[in-house]
């Protein structure tokens, strides 16, 4: 059974995909675990990543970025 968090993540992945982006999830075991980054699907360029802000994006941040 999916949790509301995984359902929300899947919805954001679909919305980003339609807009030409992809949602990457941090797999690291340190403080960035559970954070996300936005990637341009066509150029594979990082649109938003931990290196840009010092921390990864939450799902709230991703949703806000997508709606702007």
Image (tube, helix red, strand yellow):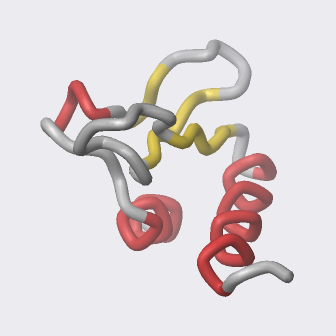
Where is residue 39? Give x, y as percent.
56, 31
**Quarter of the image containing the C terminus?**
bottom left
Q: Is residue 18 above or below residue 24?
A: below
Choose between 56 and 3: the one closer to the eye: 3
Kindly identify the residue that appears in the image at 65 percent across and 76 percent down: 8
Kindly identify the residue that appears in the image at 45 percent across and 40 percent down: 37
**Quarter of the image containing the N terminus?**
bottom right
Q: Is residue 35 above or below residue 64?
A: above
Where is residue 44? Give x, y as percent.
62, 16
In screen coordinates, is 48 left or right of 16?
left
Q: Based on the displayed image, in which of its 4 quarters is residue 7 positioned?
A: bottom right
Q: Based on the displayed image, in which of its 4 quarters is residue 12 positioned?
A: bottom right
Find the residue positioned furthest to the front.
29
In screen coordinates, is 2 left or right of 33?
right
Find the residue positioned furthest to the left.
54
Choose between 46 and 26: the one closer to the eye: 26
Where is residue 36? Give x, y as percent.
45, 47
Q: Is residue 15 above or below residue 11?
A: above
Kindly identify the residue that appears in the image at 40 percent across and 69 percent down: 64
In screen coordinates, is 32 left or right of 44?
left
Kindly identify the residue that appears in the image at 40 percent across and 72 percent down: 60
Choose between 19 and 13: the one closer to the eye: 13
Callout count:
0
């Amino acid at each position: 059974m999916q949790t509301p968090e995984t359902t929300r993540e899947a919805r954001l992945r679909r919305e980003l995909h339609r807009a030409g982006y992809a949602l990457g999830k941090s797999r690291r075991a340190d403080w960035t675990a559970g954070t996300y980054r936005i990637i341009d699907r066509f150029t594979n360029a990082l649109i938003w990543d931990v290196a840009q802000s010092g921390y990864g994006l939450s799902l709230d941040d991703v949703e806000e970025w997508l709606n702007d």
